[in-house]
Image: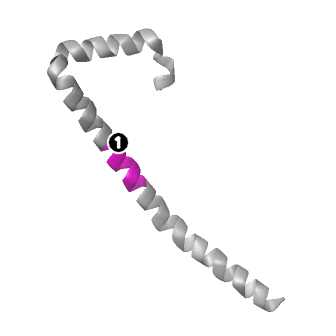
Amino acid sequence: MLANIGIPGLVLILVLALIIFGPKKLPEIGRAAGQTLREFKKSTKELTSDVTDPIEDVKKETKKFTDDIK
């Protein structure tokens, strides 16, 4: 989706944002967007680790069990 925007599209978006929000408000909006993305990324990692950690535990137990059989 964002790969098709290109440089002229990004410049247009930045100019529109500057006109709409003004130069004083733009850094605050960027900071808030960065914090939101950081929190989203952190939550996503936590959710995936909640799923993958038990799977890794089962793999370790299975390996231990098969090593004991040999």
In this image, 1 relative to 17: left or right?
right
Residue extending farthest right: 70
The vertical placement of 12 against 33, above or below, is above
- Amino acid residing under circle 1: Leu
What main secondary structure does the magenta stretch of the protein show? helix
Alpha-carbon neighbours of circle 1 within 10 Å: few (<14), some, or many (≥20)? few
Residue at the spot of label 1? 37
Tag 1 secondary structure:
helix
Q: Which residues are magenta?
A: 36-44
Q: Position of residue 17 (x, y in %)?
A: 25, 18
Q: Is residue 14 magenta?
A: no
Quadrant where the C terminus is found in the figure:
bottom right
- Figure quadrant of residue 20: top left
Q: Position of residue 65 (x, y in %)?
A: 72, 87
Q: Is residue 37 magenta?
A: yes
Q: Position of residue 62 (x, y in %)?
A: 69, 81
The vertical placement of 67 against 11, above or below, is below
- Total number of numbered labels? 1
- Figure quadrant of residue 57: bottom right
Q: Position of residue 11 (x, y in %)?
A: 37, 11
In this image, 50 relative to 63: left or right?
left
Give the colour scheme shown: one colour
Residue extending farthest bottom: 69
Residue at image position (40%, 12%) is 9
Residue at image position (32%, 15%) is 13
Residue at image position (16%, 25%) is 25
In this image, 5 relative to 61: left or right?
left
Of 25 and 2, the residue lying toward us: 25
